[in-house]
Image: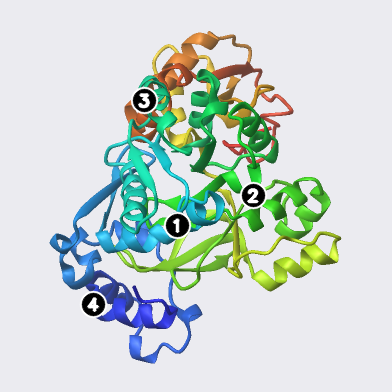
Amino acid sequence: MINEPMGLFHDVAATVPAYGKFLAERGIDPAKVTGFAELPLLDKNSYHRRYPLPQLCREGRLDALDMIAVSSGSSGEPTIWPRSVQDEVHITERFEQIFRDGFDAAGKSTLAVICFPLGTWVGGLFTLACVRHLAAKGYRITTVAPGNNKAEILRVIPELAQHFDQTVLLGYPPFVKDVIDSGEHWDRYHVKLVLAGEVFSEEWRDLVSQRAAIEDPIRHVASLYGTADAGVLGNETALSVSIRRFLAGRPDLARELFGDSRLPTLVQYDPASRYFETHEGTLLFSGDNGIPLIRYHIADEGGVIGHAEMLEFCRANGFEPPKGDDLPFVFVFGRSLFTVSFFGANVYPENVTVGLEQPGISDFVTGKFVLEAVEDDHRDRRLRITVELAPGRTGDVDAVAVSIRDQLLRLNSEFAHYVPAERQLPEVELRPAGDPEYFPVGVKHRYTRTGR
């Protein structure tokens, strides 16, 4: 792994055929680049999808990499991300920080239960590999991988957990909560959680901790910031969670610090592993992967805050953070302008549109809708879709919900495999044309909205 941004740039420019062509097409001579900020941004359309897959890899060799992950795009077209064991070993450091500092897994026998979906998607098999690398390093971790099969999870835990000091569930937040709500006797298992894929509230953390008899929500519930593009980019620590909980109680300070009334996921990251920048309120990262990426624009809304800057802000506002690693912070709102995250699956407006365009549906709706993932009084996540009726028309709510669900299952691989069957039918509300709350006349329409 090359851990200095300009060093990574020069290496990638020299060894990755696609990146060399990408620069040449823009008239950029790598030898004349004097600063990282001079380099153009990459994204899937301008880079990944423009060149043959082998050319995106070092020396043009796809066969030099030993694992393939696939992410599902808005049309269901897969995006392929090759990786190597070296990628996994490197990113295992993020898991190690959680299992070592938060869970004391070096000294406690630990049952790790992989609850992410297993298959070509990055979450399950990647997490399984990283946790097994920790075991190989000497941590007292034994792993079982039922995937997102709730019945199997609830079958194996009572059988196995009794033989270990603690049990760690690793999965998407709403799915893990569903498992906890469906199980019993959690107080016997000394539960810890590793979560990824969605922003959740501190109230959610407290509620799930209470239901799972989790002793210390700050140290024993940790969220990862990860993508299929490059694995895990950062992770919650006791320091970052403590700061987030302070800011959750001071929304005025959160707005001052993050520039938004929403409370983002707040993690720490290692700049020697993943180099973050911001661009117009969104994140860029650079990192050495199976497909090395330089200034890659992932469209996540968020920002970067230095370690000293963060601690100074907290102290200036009356909060003394606990001691922790002196790593910088990255905060992430997610891609709220474009997608909604539900059980770890990206739900795209384009998928919903197809559901509204089906015969028998399209004649009584305008095609406008608002997509939200909302949390109810029980802290369960629901997919809500508010649809605009055509002027003077009425419609069948159930028919709309079924049509949207069927198209999501058809078009969106992540939705089909991540979201439990009993949660796949969206909650649909039909509102009249020009409804002032959701469909005001004369205002540019937005198809997604942050959950309430």
Q: Residues within 10 Å of mark 4 (few under 14, many from 20)?
A: some
Of callouts 2 and 3, the N-terminal one: 3
- Percent x, y of residue 323: 68, 64
Q: Which residue does the numbered mark 1 point to in the structure image?
A: 96
Measure the C-alpha gap from mark 4 to mark 1: 31 Å
Q: Nearer the viewer, residue 356 or 407?
A: 407
Label of residue 126 in the image: none
28 left or right of 314? left
Q: Nearer the viewer, residue 33 or 451?
A: 451
Q: Which residue does the numbered mark 3 point to in the structure image?
A: 156
Of callouts 1 and 3, the N-terminal one: 1
Measure the C-alpha gap from mark 1 to mark 3: 24 Å
- Secondary structure under the numbered disc 1 in the rendered image: helix
Q: Which residue does the numbered mark 2 point to in the structure image?
A: 264
349 left or right of 80? right
Q: Is residue 62 above or below residue 208?
A: below
Q: Which residue does the numbered mark 4 point to in the structure image?
A: 15
Q: Nearer the viewer, mark 4 or mark 2?
A: 2
Measure the C-alpha gap from mark 2 to mark 1: 23 Å
Of callouts 2 and 1, the N-terminal one: 1
Residue at image coords 59%, 9%: 394
Identity of the residue furthest to the left in this view: 63
Q: How many marks?
A: 4
